[in-house]
């Protein structure tokens, strides 16, 4: 059986295999403190640490209102695939010259077809100015062993998109990836209340998830506007953003 390289250095070593998932017992909040794991060979999540965290105040349009958008029939693999695919297409709007096509997806054929057939919801454009702050996740993208700079950012994004594309190809061929198992493990620990929530440690656990890192990256790179304002009322299916569903599955809408 092929071992999946998802390893958390905790009090208990956690190993995921292609045919099964094994979860440690009594992990508690130690999950939030892990700093090392064997990285995905295909698409390692860039190193990033949240240094400041403030619990968001809930308002009339809190993140909890998004929970009604979940599609309960989709299993976690499909949610992860659609989230990553959605994010890759967003990257491709921001840097269209780096886009690589995915023509078929055997493991998620119907989801792939349905997603591509729906109207485009959002238009993303690269910001003219990106905050030049070390806290900005953008500057933690790697390029040739160093952090990205304003000069190398396009090249760092090209490499990040290439890695994401390779993971999508792996998902389409095998139905799983290392980063998917990290995501699935987190969901199990969150359900068992074995991870910190709405804390600095909890935030640093989440940014080790590829889909969460990508969400932050997109928010800091791009302007977001509704696409095709004249297309009329959108259906609930069209309004879904799968990254939000991933956050819900991880019980992380607070992030």
Image: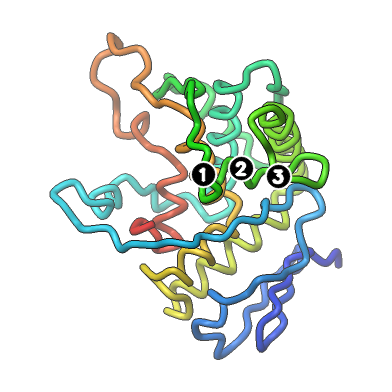
Extreme residue toward the top, this view: 230
Name the quarter where the N terminus is drawn: bottom right
Whole-number angstrom distance, CA of label 1 to CA of label 3:
12 Å
**For numbered disc 3, what is the local secondary structure?**
strand
Q: Are marks 3 and 2 in contact (CB under 8 Å)?
A: yes
Along the line of sight, the residue nearer the viewer: 219 or 38: 219
Colour theme: rainbow
**For numbered disc 1, what is the local secondary structure?**
loop
Q: Which residue is mark 1?
A: 133
**For numbered disc 2, what is the local secondary structure?**
helix
Percent of width and height locating residue 52: 43, 61
Q: Which residue is mark 3?
A: 147
Name the residue located 85 percent from the left edge and 64 percent from the top edge: 2
Name the residue located 60 percent from the left edge and 51 percent from the top edge: 210
Question: Tag 3 or tag 1, which sits nearer the N-term?
Answer: 1
Vertical relation: 228 (above or below) 75:
above
Q: Residues within 10 Å of mark 1 (few under 14, many from 20)?
A: few
Q: Are marks 1 and 3 in contact (CB under 8 Å)?
A: no
Name the residue located 54 percent from the left edge and 24 percent from the top edge: 116
Q: Which residue is mark 2?
A: 139
In the shown orientation, is residue 154 left or right of residue 195? right
Question: Tag 1 or tag 2, which sits nearer the N-term?
Answer: 1
Vertical relation: 158 (above or below) 19:
above
Q: Are marks 2 and 1 in contact (CB under 8 Å)?
A: yes
Q: Residues within 10 Å of mark 2 (few under 14, many from 20)?
A: many
Percent of width and height locating residue 176: 70, 53
């Amino acid at each position: 059986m092929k071992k999946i390289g998802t390893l958390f250095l905790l009090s208990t070593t956690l190993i995921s295999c292609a045919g099964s998932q094994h979860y440690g017992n009594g992990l508690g909040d130690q999950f939030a403190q892990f700093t090392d794991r064997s990285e995905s060979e295909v698409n390692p999540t860039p190193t990033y640490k949240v240094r400041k965290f403030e619990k968001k105040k809930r308002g009339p349009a809190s993140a909890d209102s998004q929970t009604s958008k979940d599609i309960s029939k989709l299993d976690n693999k499909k949610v992860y695939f659609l989230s990553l695919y959605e994010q890759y297409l967003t990257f491709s709007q921001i840097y269209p010259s780096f886009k690589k096509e995915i023509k078929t997806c055997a493991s998620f054929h119907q989801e792939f077809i349905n997603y591509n057939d729906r109207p485009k919801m959002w238009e993303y454009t690269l910001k003219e100015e990106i905050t030049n702050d070390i806290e900005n996740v953008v500057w933690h993208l790697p390029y040739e062993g160093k952090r990205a700079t304003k000069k190398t950012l396009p090249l760092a994004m090209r490499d990040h998109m290439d890695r994401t594309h390779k993971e999508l190809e792996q998902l389409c061929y095998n139905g799983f990836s290392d980063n998917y198992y990290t995501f699935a493990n987190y969901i199990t620990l969150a359900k068992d209340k074995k991870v910190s929530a709405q804390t600095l440690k909890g935030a640093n656990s989440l940014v080790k998830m590829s889909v969460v890192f990508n969400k932050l990256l997109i928010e800091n790179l791009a302007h977001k506007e509704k696409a095709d304002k004249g297309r009329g009322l959108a259906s609930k299916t069209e309004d879904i953003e799968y990254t939000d569903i991933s956050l819900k599955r991880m019980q992380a809408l607070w992030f």
